[in-house]
Image (spheres, rainbow, N blue to C red):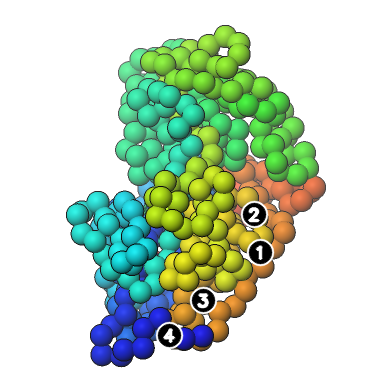
Amino acid sequence: MRRVRDVVDVPARLLLLGGGHAHLSLLQRLRSEAPKGWQVTLVSPHPRQIYSGMLPGWVAGHYALADCAISLAGLCERAGIAFAQTAATALDLEHNEVPCADGERRRFDLVSIDTGPEPALFALPGATEHALPVRPIEGFIAGWPGIVRRWNERGDPFEVAVVGSGAAAVELAFAIRFRARREDAAGVRVSLVGRDAEPLVGTAGSVGRRVLRLLQARGMHWRGDSTAAQILPGSIRFERGAALPFDACLVATGAAAPHWPRAAGLATDDAGFIRVDRTLRSVSHPQVFAAGDVAAYADARPKSGVFAVRAGAALAGNILAACNGAALTEWRPQRRSLYLVSTGDCRAIASWGEWSASGRWVWTWKDWIDRRFVQRYRD
Ligand SMILES: Cc1cc2nc3c(=O)[nH]c(=O)nc-3n(C[C@H](O)[C@H](O)[C@H](O)COP(=O)(O)OP(=O)(O)OC[C@H]3O[C@@H](n4cnc5c(N)ncnc54)[C@H](O)[C@@H]3O)c2cc1C
């Protein structure tokens, strides 16, 4: 394969957008394998990346925020690459430039995109005004302590509604209930709201039923078959059925694509996620790579941190190969992945295909995996 730029006295520019799960491997490898003749810049709105797998543990009170944080600025410094604290707002593929929120247009010869998903809030009016969306995660982190303060000031009863029925929503609902009990806020009641008959639809095996039993055993309320249509001040309006009043509402309703990749003319899937081939290169623009939730892989897989991390290793190899003019390698993601869903009380549910199990040992296992992941990116 030809080098993107053969002129060696002018450094070629590699621009990394987003310090998500997939880019962490690349940032790590750049420490020891910086491509010669390339100037590398990471663009990220925050100097740290909060590891989402540990976020419910922070809500429950098991972790300090520092336990869940990976310093992107620190990784860049150690790799000797530039860090620009801003966000990409568009992509100009004619001039190979990225307009950013700080007003700069950053030029590139190669760009790699790992900016994660946007919260899927477009179909839920009122979500940003009257509820706390779980993404962007930094916004959630800023807003969550206010909810705890309110339930402590208000006293009994205090209704918390969590909209969403995927792993993030389930974990957060259990974490909130645990946190409330830990703080002797016995009047905090937690409802989980989903559009399907049971939570975690799409996860094989009996995990959804396990979660339902656990919700019931803990006196939590599952409102299934309910599509939220609007968040009003103090209540959720549904497409059908009675409204659900709340004192605090969290929204964790899945992943949507950012608007700018499609607007730039990149090939995307119907939902707007960047279509990449098995080398994680854009199918329409060879100067663009993408991985993580923002990408639509050739072998479709669920949007999850697990697959973002796995794609990250492949992406790192291929970005370095592209910079060095070497051949790219195809990535074939595994079919199944292990899911570990925490249930607030230092217990968790594990699922692998049809198999599932739960208990304290699953939490110990998850805690070990998560801490080790974050530790890998520390000095
Ligand atoms: C509470 C919670 C718990 C979860 N638990 C699990 C779990 O246990 N297992 C699992 O597999 N998945 C889990 N997930 C899903 C997981 O978080 C995502 O699938 C994963 O984060 C996707 O990784 P990513 O690399 O695509 O992007 P992300 O990890 O989301 O990172 C994207 C980065 O890009 C930055 N960025 C965003 N926009 C821009 C821009 N315009 N310009 C520059 N930078 C930008 C962001 O600030 C962020 O740092 C959980 C999600 C949540 C919310």
The answer, for residue 63, to whether it is visible in the render is: no
The structure residue drawn at horizontal position 71% and vertical position 56%, both measured from the top left corner, is 336
- CB at disc 1 and ligand 1 closer than 8 Å: no
- Upstream in sequence: badge 1 or badge 4: 4
Q: What element carries label 3?
A: helix
Q: Residue at 43% x, 85% y: name it.
A: 3
Cα–Cα gap, marks 3 and 1: 15 Å
The answer to whether marks 1 and 2 mark residues whose Cβ atoms lie closer than 8 Å is yes
Residue at the extreme top of the image, as rendered: 242
Q: Does label 2 point to a residue whose CB lies under 8 Å from ligand 1?
A: no
Residue 116's place in the image compared with 168, above or below, is below
Q: In this view, does 233 lie above or below 338?
A: above
- Residue position marked by numbered label 4 in the rendering: 3
| Viewer-nearest residue: 167 or 60 | 167
| Nearer the observer, 153 or 113 | 113
**Relative to residue 89, is residue 226 drawn left or right?**
right
- In the picture of the structure, the residue carrying the numbered disc 2 is 301
> Which numbered marker is on residue 318?
3
The image position of residue 364, as x and y in percent, is 60, 52
What kind of residue is marked 1? Answer: Pro
Please give the label number shown on residue 333.
1
Within-10-Å neighbours for mark 1: few <14, some 14–19, many 20+: some
Q: Residue at x 43, y 47 (%)?
A: 258
Quadrant hosting residue 228: top right
Q: What residue type is labelled 4?
A: Arg
The percent position of residue 136, horizontal first and vertical second, equals: 39, 43
Tell me if residue 272 can be seen: yes
Position of 235 relative to 128 (above/below): above
Query: Badge 3: how crowded within 10 Å, few (<14), some, or many (20+)?
Result: many
How far is the residue under mark 4 from the one under mark 2? Answer: 31 Å
Label located before the other in sequence (1 or 2):
2
